[in-house]
Amino acid sequence: MILSDKRILEEIEAGNILIEPFVKDKLGTNSYDVHLGRYLACYENRVLDAKSHNKVAHFEIPFDGFVLEPNTLYLGVTEEYTETHKHVPFLEGKSSTGRLGIDIHATAGKGDVGFCNTWTLEISCIQPVKIYRGMPIGQLIYFEVEGEIEQLYNKKKGAKYNTRTIKPVESMMWKNKF
């Protein structure tokens, strides 16, 4: 079941959902709009290796915008820091973003209960498009969880994305054993 606007507000009041900064005008009928933070990152090497630490170069989006180019994976970050202690958060693109040919996540739209951080975005585009820091980029949708949670993500040993950050975080696949 997806939480309604009133239910999201109740869960914020109860401390089960945290959104910083929270602006009530960004609350939709059943979602909350998130915005592009000021940092992007690109991988330093064109060929990525799943067993290696692929380093990224971070840079700030200029106030007058930045042109995304096709065939490049950009890592972005949300302005909003979020915590979810009882619900499953899903990050989806906004239709206005999609209509510009921008995808904001390749595969990682679902968060885990206990995820406490900004959201790293896996941004790609169909054609060149100019983006701006602070622009609406996606929306968070919250789902009810059936049953008790044994271990929250932020308490899980070996969770790779627990360090609070305002910059996009590169893949930590290389930390897996395979």
Image: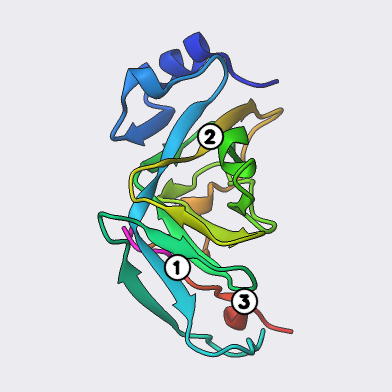
Question: Which dot, 1 or 3, sits closer to the camera?
Answer: 1
User: Quick one: SS at disc 3?
Assistant: helix
- Quadrant where the N terminus sits is top right
Q: Quadrant of residue 9?
A: top left
Asked whether residue 14 appears in the rendered view, the answer is: no
Distance (Cα) linking label 1 and label 3:
12 Å
Which one is nearer the viewer's eye here, 38 or 53? 38
Q: Residues within 10 Å of mark 3 (few under 14, many from 20)?
A: some
Q: Residues within 10 Å of mark 2 (few under 14, many from 20)?
A: many
The residue under the point 50% across, 44% down is 114
Which one is nearer the viewer's eye here, 32 or 173? 32
Report the number of numbered marks.
Answer: 3
Labels 2 and 3 touching (C-beta < 8 A): no
Q: Residues within 10 Å of mark 1 (few under 14, many from 20)?
A: many
In the image, residue 19 sits, relative to residue 108, either above or below, namely above
Name the amino acid, label 3: Met
Per the image, the residue denoted by label 3 is 173
Q: Which mark is residue 169?
A: 1
Name the amino acid, label 2: Gln
Left or right, 52 with reference to 19 = right
Residue 178 on image: x %, y %: 74, 84
Q: Which residues are magenta?
A: 164-169
Labels 2 and 1 touching (C-beta < 8 A): no
Answer whether residue 146 is magenta in the image: no
Which one is nearer the viewer's eye here, 112 or 129? 129
Q: Which mark is residue 139?
A: 2
Residue 139 on image: x %, y %: 53, 34
Examine the residues drawn in magenta and state their main secondary structure: loop
Question: Which dot, 2 or 3, sits closer to the camera?
Answer: 2
